[in-house]
Image (cartoon, grey):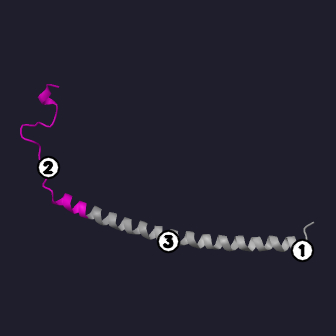
Amino acid sequence: MATLQDLAERVDRLVLRHQELQRTSALIEQQLAAVTAERDSLRSRLAAARSRIDALIERLPPETPPKGSTGGNAERGA
C-alpha cells in the first residue's frame, strides 16, 4: 500500500506533467495560428496571381491555325 509520502510525490509529478503539457499545448496553438495565417496569406496571393494570369490570357489574340494547315491528318494521306 502506498504511503502518504508516495502519494504526495506522485501528485507533485502529475502537477508538473500537467503544467508541462499546458505549456506544450500553448506553444502548439501559437504555431497553429502562425501556420494558419501563413496559409491564408498564400491562398490570397495565389488567388491574386490567378486573377492576373486570367487577365493576361484575356488579352491574348485569338488563336489562328497556321497557313496551309487543314487541321487534320489529310496531309499525310490518312
Q: Earlier in the sequence, mark 2 or mark 1?
A: 1
Relative to 1, 12 lies left or right: left
- Which residue in the structure is indicated by mark 3? 33
Q: Quadrant of the N terminus?
A: bottom right
Say left or right for 68 vs 20.
left
Q: Which mark is residue 41?
A: none
Mark 2, residue position: 63
Q: Inspect the image, locate mark 2, and give the three-letter code of the amino acid beneath it.
A: Glu
For the view shown, which residue lies furthest in the top direction? 77
In the rendered image, residue 67 lying in the magenta stretch gets the answer yes
Mark 1 vs mark 3, CA separation in Å:
43 Å
Q: Circle 2 — which element?
A: loop
The mark closer to the camera, 2 or 1, is 1
| Residue 16 percent across, percent down from the top left | 72, 73
Residue 25 shown left or right of residue 6 in the figure: left
| Magenta segment boundaries in residue numbering | 52-78
Q: Earlier in the sequence, mark 1 or mark 3?
A: 1
Pinpoint residue 66: horizontal percent, then vertical percent: 9, 42
- Which residue is most to the left? 67
What x and y, as percent, mark residue 62? 13, 53
Residue at the (15%, 56%) spot, across then down: 60
Q: Was residue 4 drawn as part of the magenta stretch in this picture?
A: no
Mark 1 sits on what residue?
4
User: Which residue occupies the foreground of this view, 70 or 37?
Assistant: 37
Q: Which residue lies at the image location 42% right of the left edge and 68% below the top edge?
A: 38
Location of residue 25 by image quarter = bottom right
